[in-house]
Image (cartoon, rainbow, N blue to C red):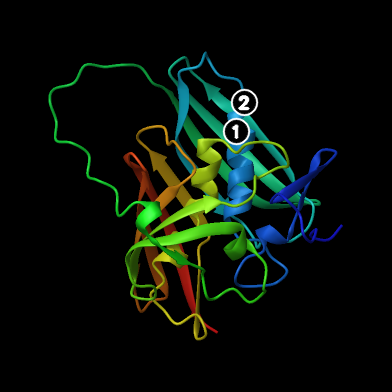
């Protein structure tokens, strides 16, 4: 089954499979997905793993993209690999047919109120989305894809300079008639850090990330996620994209992507 056109979600359920729609299409190939949607699928599957009460929250999610994720039906799984009352380790996977295309691990911790000494207030987020300029990633090849399925607004900086802050939110749910969780909203946006902070001409170079790691020091809230992103490059063909992540209430964590740089 091919990617569905004019769909109202990133994926459509098909038994135990998830059929990608055109909204998942990435920038490097018309046949492959952007990393954000499968990362959000993994986050969703991990959230469904059993916990010890309501106080557990994912504080770290790492996704490894073992090969390009095709626009083809996917199966997703997750399990608890070590279960503690205050800390849990989770593992997840995405398969296209018999091939494993993504692998993930997550750390879930029990949150509780702890009195702490007075501290400096959190840094304020960049300019709020309501006052930021609309933006569409210019390097996608197809007319419809992830870049049109996500609303983007520039909060600070200029595209193409290696550092920029951008607010992002989903125009469609991950699955039909299912509101995405805050973790899913972060996962689907955070894989765009290298695009937000693009430092190279995309007509001459590719800068593909084989991994994504998200650390969260507090639960995110709201529809908008801000990626305050910066890319560092090296002539050995290796780069790093690092984001401070915000919701409209302030900083929520960081994301990191390793970059494989190559001439087109």
Q: Pointer 2: residues within 10 angstroms few (<14), some, or many (20+)?
A: few
Quadrant of residue 248 within the rendered picture: top left
- Residue in the image at 64% along x and 43% along y: 41
On screen, residue 180 above or below 3: above
In depth, the one of 210 and 11 nearer the eye is 11
Q: Is residue 1 left or right of residue 61?
A: right
Q: Is 135 situated above or below 251? A: below
Q: Residue 148: x and y, percent?
A: 60, 63
**Quarter that holds the C terminus:** bottom right
Residue on which disc 2 sits: 49
Residue 167: image x %, image y %?
A: 42, 55
Q: Which residue is mark 1?
A: 46
Contact? badges 1 and 2 (CB < 8 Å): yes
> Which residue is drawn at the image coordinates 38% and 21% (left, top)?
111
Q: Is residue 196 left or right of residue 244?
A: right
Residue 132 is drawn in which quadrant? bottom left
Q: Is residue 206 visible?
A: yes
């Amino acid at each position: 089954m091919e990617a569905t056109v004019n769909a109202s979600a990133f994926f459509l359920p098909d038994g135990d499979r998830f059929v990608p729609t055109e909204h998942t299409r990435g920038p490097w190939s018309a046949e492959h997905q952007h990393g954000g949607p499968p990362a959000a699928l993994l986050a969703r599957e991990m959230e469904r793993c059993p916990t010890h009460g309501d106080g557990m929250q994912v504080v770290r999610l790492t996704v490894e993209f073992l090969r390009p994720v095709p626009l083809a039906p996917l199966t997703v799984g997750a399990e608890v690999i070590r279960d503690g009352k205050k800390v849990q380790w989770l593992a997840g996977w995405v398969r296209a047919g018999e091939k494993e295309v993504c692998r993930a691990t997550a750390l879930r911790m029990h949150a509780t109120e702890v009195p702490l000494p007075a501290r400096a207030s959190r840094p304020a987020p960049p300019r709020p989305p309501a006052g930021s300029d609309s933006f569409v990633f210019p390097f996608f090849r197809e007319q419809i894809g992830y870049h049109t399925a996500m609303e983007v607004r520039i909060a600070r900086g200029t595209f193409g300079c290696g550092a920029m802050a951008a607010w992002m939110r989903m125009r469609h749910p991950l699955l039909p008639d299912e509101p995405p969780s805050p973790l899913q909203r972060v996962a689907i946006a955070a894989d765009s850090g290298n695009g937000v902070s693009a430092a190279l001409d995309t007509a001459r170079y590719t800068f593909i990330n084989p991994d994504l790691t998200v650390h969260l020091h507090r639960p995110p809230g709201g529809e908008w996620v801000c990626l305050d992103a910066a890319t560092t490059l090296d002539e050995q063909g290796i780069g790093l994209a690092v984001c401070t992540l915000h919701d409209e209430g302030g900083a929520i964590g960081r994301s990191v992507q390793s970059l494989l740089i190559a001439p087109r």
